[in-house]
Image: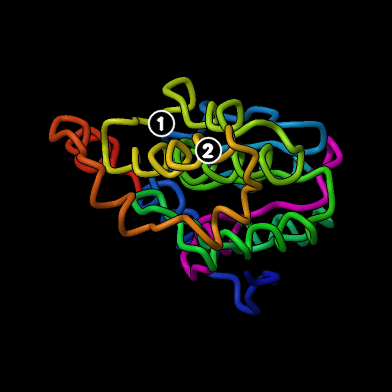
């Protein structure tokens, strides 16, 4: 996790070109995929500077970038917009096509404890990594049942369970029977959870992989 600060040199037009075209920002001009997860926590796709300002106007104090530290124009513009709006930008790396590793799951608990609310979490499309972290927020912070929390991974957010991103659903399903037996989530993570086993048992479907990787071009 990194507390982000804007870089010293502004690249101007180059940043905007990278955001709009390289990062497919033109697809997000009117589609925000923004939803409230719980009181004080929101999820969305990658916000541009205007949406960062709007988030600040609605009281958001922290933006959590789930795409990890980057040096492209989209990140530069986001960091600068957060600085202008007085919003803390946190960089955190979540993966959309892998069973979460244990270190990341423990880092998630630290992230949620440190983030000042109201907060907004985002990835590129707001579908997979934002869904994973929203589900973990409900499970870890809000103490909601895992089956309820896992509903944050759903088609209405753009999440495709049949693609490689379905590994995120498989991760939660692996915990369901242990939660039913009364085992706490992090006890399961530390003592039972096997990311390799979850990965081996999951099979993505070809049409869904083509949809997410070739057509939607998800990260």
Q: Residues within 10 Å of mark 1 (few under 14, many from 20)?
A: many
Choose top left, top right, bottom left or bottom right for residue 48.
top right
Confirm whether the magenta stretch covers residue 197. Answer: no
Q: Residue furthest bottom?
A: 8
Residue 177 percent location from the top left of the image: 49, 35
Q: In the rendered view, would you say 84 is above or below 34?
A: below
Q: Nearer the viewer, residue 75 or 199?
A: 199
Q: Nearer the viewer, residue 7 or 136?
A: 136
Horizontal side of residue 184 vs 39, given as left or right: left
The residue lying at 77 percent from left, 62 percent from top is 83
User: Which of the numbered marks, if any, corresponds to residue 159?
Assistant: 1
Tell me, what colour scheme is on the image? rainbow
Choose top left, top right, bottom left or bottom right for residue 107.
bottom right
Q: Which residues are magenta?
A: 56-77
Residue 206 percent location from the top left of the image: 13, 35
Residue at mark 2? 131
> What is the quadrant of the N terminus in the image?
bottom right
Confirm whether the magenta stretch covers residue 73. Answer: yes
Residue 97 percent location from the top left of the image: 34, 50
The residue lying at 38 percent from left, 40 percent from top is 170
Circles 1 and 2: CB atoms closer than 8 Å: yes
Which badge, 1 or 2, is on the more N-terminal residue?
2
The residue lying at 49 percent from left, 68 percent from top is 70
Horizontal side of residue 169 vs 76, given as left or right: left
| Disc 1, SS | loop
Q: Residues within 10 Å of mark 2 (few under 14, many from 20)?
A: many
Residue 155 percent location from the top left of the image: 42, 22
Q: Residue furthest front?
A: 181
Choose top left, top right, bottom left or bottom right for residue 66.
bottom right
């Amino acid at each position: 996790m990194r507390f982000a600060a804007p870089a010293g040199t502004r690249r101007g037009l180059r940043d905007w070109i990278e955001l709009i075209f390289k990062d497919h920002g033109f697809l997000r001009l009117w589609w925000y995929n923004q939803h409230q997860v719980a009181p004080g926590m929101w999820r969305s796709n990658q916000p541009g500077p205007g949406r960062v300002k709007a988030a600040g106007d609605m009281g958001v104090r922290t933006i959590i970038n789930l795409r990890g530290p980057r040096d492209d124009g989209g990140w530069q513009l986001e960091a600068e917009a957060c600085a202008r709006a007085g919003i803390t930008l946190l960089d955190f790396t979540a993966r959309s096509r892998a069973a979460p590793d244990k270190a990341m799951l423990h880092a998630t608990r630290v992230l949620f404890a440190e983030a000042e609310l109201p907060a907004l979490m985002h990835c590129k499309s707001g579908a997979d990594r934002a869904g994973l972290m929203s589900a973990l927020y409900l499970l870890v912070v809000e103490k909601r049942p895992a089956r309820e929390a896992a509903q944050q991974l759903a088609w209405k957010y753009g999440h495709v369970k049949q693609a490689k991103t379905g590994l995120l659903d498989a991760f939660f399903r692996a915990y369901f029977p242990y939660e039913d037996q009364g085992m706490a989530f992090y006890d399961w993570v530390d003592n039972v959870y096997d990311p390799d086993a979850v990965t081996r048992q999951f099979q993505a479907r070809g049409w869904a992989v083509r949809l997410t990787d070739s057509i939607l071009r998800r990260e």
